[in-house]
Image (tube, coloured by chain):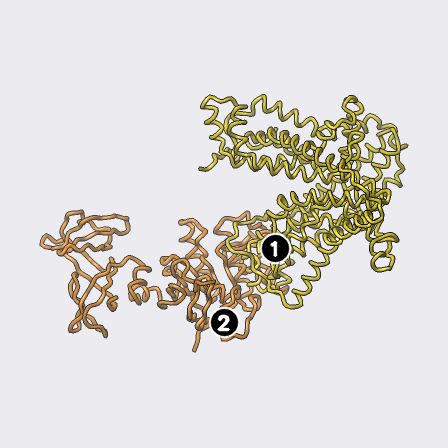
Chain colours: A orange, B yellow
Amino acid sequence: MSGFISWQDVDRAFGDSKALARFTLDVDEGAILCLVGPSGCGKTTALRVLAGFDRPDAGRVEIRGRTVVDGSSFVPPERRSVGMVFQDYALFPHLTVEANIRYGLGPTQRNRVGEVLELTGLEGMGDRMPHELSGGEQQRVALARALAPRPDAILLDEPFSNLDASLRDRMRREVRRILNDAGTTAVLVTHDQEEALAVADTVAIMRSGTVLQVGTPTEVYQRPADPWVAGFLGDSVGLTGHVAGGKVSTVLGSFLYRGPLEGPVEVMVRPEWIEPTPDEGGDVTVVDREFYGHDQMLELELPGGTRIISRVGPRPGFRPGDVVRLKVSEAVVFPPE
Amino acid sequence: MLAPTSREGRPGARPGRGPSRLLLLAAFLVLVPVALPIVSLVGTVLANLGELDSVLSWERLLELSARSVLLVATVTATALVIGTSLAWVLVRTDLPGRRLWSVAVALPLAIPSYVLALTLLAFSGPRGLFQDFAGIELPVFDGFFGAWLALSLSTFPYVFLLTAESFRSIDPSLEEAARGLGASPTRVFLTITLPQLRPALGAGALLSGLYALSDFGAVSLMRYDTFTRAIYAQYAGRLDRTPAATLSILLIVLALAFIWGEQRSRGRGELWSRTVRRPAPTHILTMLGRAGSRIWLSLVVVTGVVLPACVLVAWVARGVAAGSIVEFDWGALGGTLLVSALAATVATVFAIPVAILTVRHPGRIATWVDRLVGVTYSLPHITVALAVLVFTLAWLRPLYQGIGVLVVAYAAVFLSQAAGAATSALRTVNPNLEEASRGLGHSSAATLVRVTLPLIWRGLLAGAALVFLTTVKELPITLLLRPTGLDTLAVRVWSAAGELFYANAAMSALLLVLVSVIPAYLLVIKPRAVRA
């Protein structure tokens, strides 16, 4: 059973470089899926193949159970019922906001313009020209225009990258709200893992044209599929460990382990899973501290000389030179490289 | 290193100091010949205001206006259709050989309109080449039809070059967004692509319309009565210059109205071209589309390039065979090269103070200088020629029919081309370099010679070459202002064709095209040719 949107073994190469290599992914109806990966990993190509702006070399793409492209057939973009929000918004510069939104509507759907203007918080701006709008407003118009024809899916290509940092956080929440209110299935492409974790219902992590892991933001962050994904999605502490008798032992101590691996392994710990407590009798030393206000990062030196980082709340008692005791709440075990 | 930016945000402006007196004086001296034509014409008409109604009947004026407007409208429409369709095929489709085709369709730029008119006349009609080869007599391509055809073929390359550039700079995501919203390719072209092309189409319409309105050579060879031809007839037929001057003013008003109309028709939306990261999507032609495109391209290239070239060569061969071209008088070639080289030199010298003023001292004076240069450039040449003639006869009698007046008139009219090239060259020169030179003890004149000119000479040379090319093809100014005894190829073509000596006209025309084709290719066609 494939998803509402599904890519099946899609290949796409540009000259020698493979943008997509047997790319396979399903998106559930009504979900917001974030396709995240470093630049050049093929995520934008996946989006363009879905929209019909690019034709894959092999494989199949389905939208709502209908094949839109495979080896023998190709549905042109205007008949795929997907709305695209471009990185540069691509608002038609010669048309008003209202005419931009009306562009994808039939003559009987005029009242839809008012609906999406309201949905996106653009009431009263219908007569403006695109160049008279701020970046955030342009983005809302792009979204309103894409949503207006009630497409099966909305595709967003790096939608927040043209906004400055303060506006970006607000627009993320706003876009998420709008997409949820509209109930549309959405695929969002980004290179920013924080953005992906914040906006998505489901995150798909991509590298070199293939999907490495799919899951909820919590799943992929807490249980990354491999060390690369772990490092890509956030700060991590990598350690070597050894599994024996249902336990994995590391320099940070031993943890219960229920899994198939035996012998030498790699162990990943998030900095916030390491909890230091000030203790005169401890054997771990605080080497450095960066204080952010809402939390702080500590650099700690273990007895053997290994240095690790830990993220804790803004509690006092962690000056460089202080001695602490550690408690580690979780760890993830990977096979050795 | 980045050039410092002035408050106005123009690169290369030198903040703080205003232009020096020397620079203002130089600019003023340059502007005298530039402003003179308009002032002189207005003066002549104002001085004879009382006699105007006796000069020309209203019916005649209406008739001339209607003919001119008809020609402008049809030529502009044809040039837009040909130019835009070719640009689309050569930029946005996968037709093989696009680069070669794009050079071929731009080649008519090297052929002046009166040479195209000559080839059409020498091809059709009872003595035409077509009858020679096919044995069937074609009706003569003259009158409105001939003028329309010759001028359309002369002007569509401008539209082609402008729209091709525009097709390349359209943000491809606009068209994709429209497709994604459910629009068919045709609807996308009409509602998204075409409005994005609007500035290019407007500029193309303006260029070809003004060209048709100002053209003298083609309409007079085709015997199609427009303002320019009537002005010349008045000039040649009477000693009193007032009627010709009056008609000239009316023609200028018509030209300005056309420019104004084009500017008024611009929409409210902003059209911006972004730095395009991706090339625009390529339209894959079907077999039928490919065949159709090839036929259309071939039709244009054959009519606009191959046919004129063949007609000229065939008539030269005919002339040699019949003994009417026994030996060619090389004087006309020499005359063309001489006046064109002089015009290029003088225009370039004129351009230097204008460029320094515009780039280093932007402000009100610079804006007005710029405008004046632009307006004079867009004036119909026959009116400029007449104005200079009237002024010289009234105030500078000793210079009348001197080569100096002719060359300064060319330079004043074509200053826009030279100044444009000099301005963009100067913008790339960091003003700190000039200030460093001043700080090291050199005067502003010495700095100009030792620092600025060595850095911008390539730009100046390109501008000079453009003026040279335009002067080679120029007809009305040459015709009215040349010294007795100075012959040029343009004048030769025009007078021989007017007297139906097609063999002689063809010989001069062939030389003329050969002289202009290389600079036209290097300066205009090659830099803009479609990249395959």
Q: Nearer the viewer, residue B465 or A204?
A: B465
- Count every numbered label the image shows and give the total: 2
- Give the residue displayed 56% in from the left and 49% down from the top: B273
Question: In the shown orientation, is residue B95 left or right of residue B140?
Answer: left
Q: Quadrant of the C terminus of chain A?
A: bottom left
Picture quarter containing residue B413? top right
Q: Amino acid at mark 1?
A: Arg
- Give the residue displayed 30% in from the left and 60% down from the top: A231
Q: Residues within 10 Å of mark 1 (few under 14, many from 20)?
A: some
Q: Nearer the viewer, mark 2 or mark 1?
A: 1
- Give the residue displayed 15% in from the left and 63% down from the top: A253
- Residue A308 in percent (x, y) is at 21, 55
Regarding residue B65, the answer to whether it shows in the image is no
The residue wearing badge 2 is A63
Mark 2 and mark 1: Cα distance apart in space: 40 Å
Q: Amino acid at mark 2?
A: Ile
- Numbered disc 2: secondary structure: strand
Regarding residue A11, the answer to whether it shows in the image is yes
Question: Which disc number belongs to residue B396?
Answer: none
Q: Quadrant of the N terminus of chain A?
A: bottom left
Q: Chain of mark 1?
A: B
The residue wearing badge 1 is B99
Q: Nearer the viewer, residue A70 or B443?
A: B443
- Residue B310 in percent (x, y) is at 76, 53
Q: Is residue B303 above or below residue B265?
A: below
Question: In the shown orientation, is residue B483 left or right of residue A146?
Answer: right
- Residue B423 in percent (x, y) is at 58, 35
Question: In the shown orientation, is residue B493 left or right of residue B197?
Answer: right
